[in-house]
């Protein structure tokens, strides 16, 4: 990709400054954002992503702009899936709603750091071993199946504390109550951690698990580390405001996980097809490229992603409306 170095460096500096300013705003004025405030921030970040896509089109061409938009939408849809888990974690640890903004922002920063490390590792592996796309593809198809058919009580499974959280409880002193958004507090003259430290660790472990899904997914759309990283940044920016904007609506998106599962499965198939085109494994087709494997374009991927999310969201809202109508009739 032929992008000016100043554009890449400048973009990353501007995005980091925006995230730092957002974090500083939360630290100075912790509060529960109104729907209007959340809406304006979400629109701002979405508009920023579209402007960035336009600049990508201008400097690198429509193919790379399309890769960015497709990657951003994929990561955005997976990030919305994160919100379901964040809601459960906030509920499980009874985080005061006023301080949930800080928890979400810290979670987003942890996610960016972890995804940055995964992106660097993934880019290095892909450059040396093209056959890794077979593994990425199979993993995404497996993840898609688990997403669509989780089995058992999925919510209760998520609520189970991780090994790290249990170890944390046993090794450090943690107070019973929160002390505002503080991580450390003073109880009867003794310095202790507040339950906020457990929440941060739980969010961080969740981000790590989601990074395992999201990074292979976006590498199925583009192999440019710059596009992969910026798409992740834009997907995570505004996620905090989206959390408060959607609110109870998350419970009504009952079919969203099917849309996400379909996207993951589609990208998994695309990755395997790409691996077949680049095949170097001697036990598959004698180590030769497989010419008949389908070549799925960036714009087809973008279309599938958009249609999947629209259909899943629309079906969820229609079902929620019908259920509400049935409840009203039963009450009468």
Image: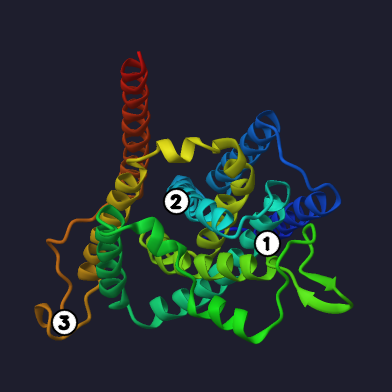
Dot 1, crowdedness within 10 Å: few (<14), some or many (≥20)? some
Where the C terminus falls, by quadrant?
top left
Q: CA distance from mark 1 to mark 3?
A: 46 Å
Q: Earlier in the sequence, mark 1 or mark 3?
A: 1
Q: Secondary structure at mark 1?
A: helix
- The residue shown at (15%, 86%) is 282
Q: Which mark is residue 106?
A: 1
Q: Find residue 102 and report its horizontal and vertical position in percent.
A: 72, 55
Any part of residue 142 in sight: yes
Q: Find residue 166 and report its horizontal and vertical position in percent.
A: 54, 79
Q: Secondary structure at mark 2?
A: helix
Q: Secondary structure at mark 3?
A: helix
Dot 2, crowdedness within 10 Å: few (<14), some or many (≥20)? some
- The residue shown at (45%, 68%) is 160
Q: Is residue 34 left or right of residue 61?
A: right
Query: Which quadrant of the figure has residue 90?
Result: bottom right
Q: Find residue 207 and report its horizontal and vertical position in percent.
A: 52, 65
Dot 3, crowdedness within 10 Å: few (<14), some or many (≥20)? few
Front residue of 153/62: it is: 153
Any part of residue 7 in sight: no
Query: Which quadrant of the figure has residue 110?
Result: bottom right
User: CB atoms at circles 1 and 2 under 8 Å apart?
Assistant: no
Q: Which mark is residue 287?
A: 3
Q: Is residue 97 left or right of residue 212?
A: right
Residue corresponding to mark 2: 81
Residue farthest along the top direction in this orientation: 332
Front residue of 200/210: it is: 200
- The residue shown at (59%, 39%) is 46
Q: Find residue 281 and report its horizontal and vertical position in percent.
A: 20, 83
């Amino acid at each position: 990709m032929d992008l000016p170095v100043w554009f890449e460096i400048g973009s990353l500096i501007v995005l980091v400054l925006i995230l730092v300013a957002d974090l500083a705003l939360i630290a100075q004025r912790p509060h529960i954002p109104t729907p209007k405030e959340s809406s304006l921030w979400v629109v701002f970040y979405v508009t920023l992503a579209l402007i960035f896509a336009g600049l990508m089109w201008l400097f690198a061409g429509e193919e790379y702009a399309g890769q960015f938009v497709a990657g951003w939408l994929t990561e955005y849809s997976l990030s919305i899936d994160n919100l379901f888990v964040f809601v459960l974690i906030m509920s499980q640890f009874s985080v005061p709603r006023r301080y949930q903004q800080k928890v979400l922002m810290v979670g987003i920063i942890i996610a960016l750091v972890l995804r940055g490390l995964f992106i660097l590792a993934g880019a290095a592996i892909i450059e040396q071993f093209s056959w890794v796309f077979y593994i990425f593809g199979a993993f995404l198809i497996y993840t898609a199946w688990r997403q669509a058919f989780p089995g058992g009580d999925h919510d209760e499974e998520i609520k189970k504390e991780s090994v790290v959280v249990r170890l944390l409880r046993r090794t450090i002193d943690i107070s019973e109550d929160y002390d505002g958004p503080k991580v450390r507090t003073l109880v009867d003259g003794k310095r202790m951690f507040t339950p906020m430290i457990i929440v941060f660790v739980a969010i961080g472990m969740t981000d790590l698990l989601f990074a395992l899904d999201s990074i292979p997914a976006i590498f199925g759309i583009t192999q440019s580390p710059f596009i992969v990283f910026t798409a992740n940044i834009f997907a995570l920016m505004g996620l905090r405001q989206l959390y408060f904007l959607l609110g109870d609506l998350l419970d009504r998106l009952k079919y969203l996980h099917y849309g996400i599962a379909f996207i993951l499965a589609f990208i998994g198939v695309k990755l395997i097809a790409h691996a077949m085109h680049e095949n170097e494994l001697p036990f598959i087709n004698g180590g030769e490229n497989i010419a008949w494997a389908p070549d799925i374009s960036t714009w087809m991927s973008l279309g599938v992603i958009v249609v999947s999310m629209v259909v899943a969201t629309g079906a969820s809202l229609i079902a929620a409306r019908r259920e509400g109508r049935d409840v009203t009739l039963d009450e009468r």
